[in-house]
Image (cartoon, rainbow, N blue to C red):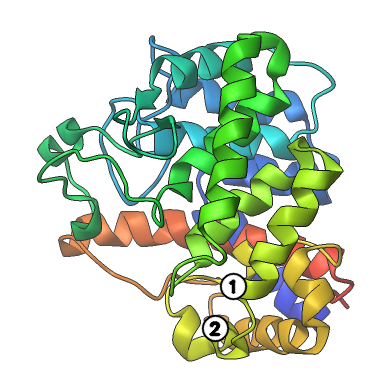
Amino acid sequence: MLSKSQFEKAENFIRSHARPIDQALYNLEFNNGSPQMVLDLLKNYQNDDGGFGQALEPDFRTKRSSVLATTVAMQYLNELKLSKPNKIIERAISYLTKSIQQFSMDFPLRYFWYPVPRIINHSSQAPWWIIEKLEPPNIESWPNPSVEVIGYLLQYSDLVLPFLLEEVVIDLNEYLKLVPKLRKSPYYDFLCFKRLLPQISEDLQKQIFIMLENSFRDTELLNTTNLKDVKIQRLVTEKNSFLYRKFPKKIVNLLQNEVDRLFPDGGSHPSWKWGETDLWNKIEKEWAGKLTYELLVTLKYCDLLD
């Protein structure tokens, strides 16, 4: 449970240190803020090609567009619960469809997306984003980011050619036949499926739930040691989340642990670090503002705010 005084500290941290776009999301969720404010700020991260860059994903600082940064933008847009797609979404979906890649004919799946282009090597980025050579993913690493991208194509199906929608659903079904569970560290792949689930049929949802059940049979995956840099508020956003329904006590304990680890300044700070001191100080604040907002929202929708 987050106390009133802890909430006020976290709120003050967001107001003082978070990026304007995360502040706008916070105000939308907790202070009757305007969705238009979030949209106006998000426009600053969209490039002429429709994709997003401009360090919207804080761990790589390139201004150039990337599929991964564009999926982050779509996450922001989904929080607004817009009744219909706007120009920002139309351009983003166009960018994602143009960024599609095809596997060779002997691969069991047809399509994939590179998360980032090689050009990000010319800007500051976390070491895990240094790209030596662009290569198609193997079957186990395919979901991130391709599954999340497919979710957005299905969500805005009126903006996508019908034959492409049919083929990406075939890819999803083929993947589920070939891969009974997610790889050893499943967290980011899990997030991609989590974002896909609302956009697919009940039958396909059931198949994915079986795969997720297989993936999380080892409950040791859900402890602070194994989670490492993956914050629990990213994996669980509400009581209806898959992991909350499956492990309610464990998830509540993990959320309480995250509350207990709040810094004296009220922020939920990242546990990873990279870059020069001055640069990292800026990036660390960006991440902490976003993570603190996400923690407050998760606590709200899990009835854990005092």
Task: Check disc 2: other Cα within 10 Å, few if <14, some if 14-19, many if 20+.
Answer: some
Which label's residue is closer to the chain start, 1 or 2?
1
Residue 293: x and y in percent read 64, 58
Q: Residue at x 48, y 17 (%)?
A: 97
Q: Residue at x 72, y 11 (%)?
A: 158
Q: Residue at x 32, y 28 (%)?
A: 105
Up/down of 259 relative to 39, above or below: below
Identity, as a three-letter code, of the amino acid under mark 2: Leu
Residue 303: x and y in percent read 89, 72
Q: Residue at x 62, y 77 (%)?
A: 216
The local secondary structure at tag 2 comes to: helix
Residue 256: x and y in percent read 71, 86
The local secondary structure at tag 1 comes to: helix
Q: Are marks 1 and 2 in contact (CB under 8 Å)?
A: yes
Up/down of 100 relative to 296, above or below: above
Residue mark closest to the camera, 1 vs 2: 1
Q: CA distance from mark 1 to mark 2?
A: 9 Å
The residue labelled by disc 2 is 221
Q: Which mark is residue 215?
A: 1
Up/down of 196 relative to 250, above or below: above
**Residue 269 in view:** yes
Closer to us: 34 or 94:
94
Identity, as a three-letter code, of the amino acid under mark 1: Ser
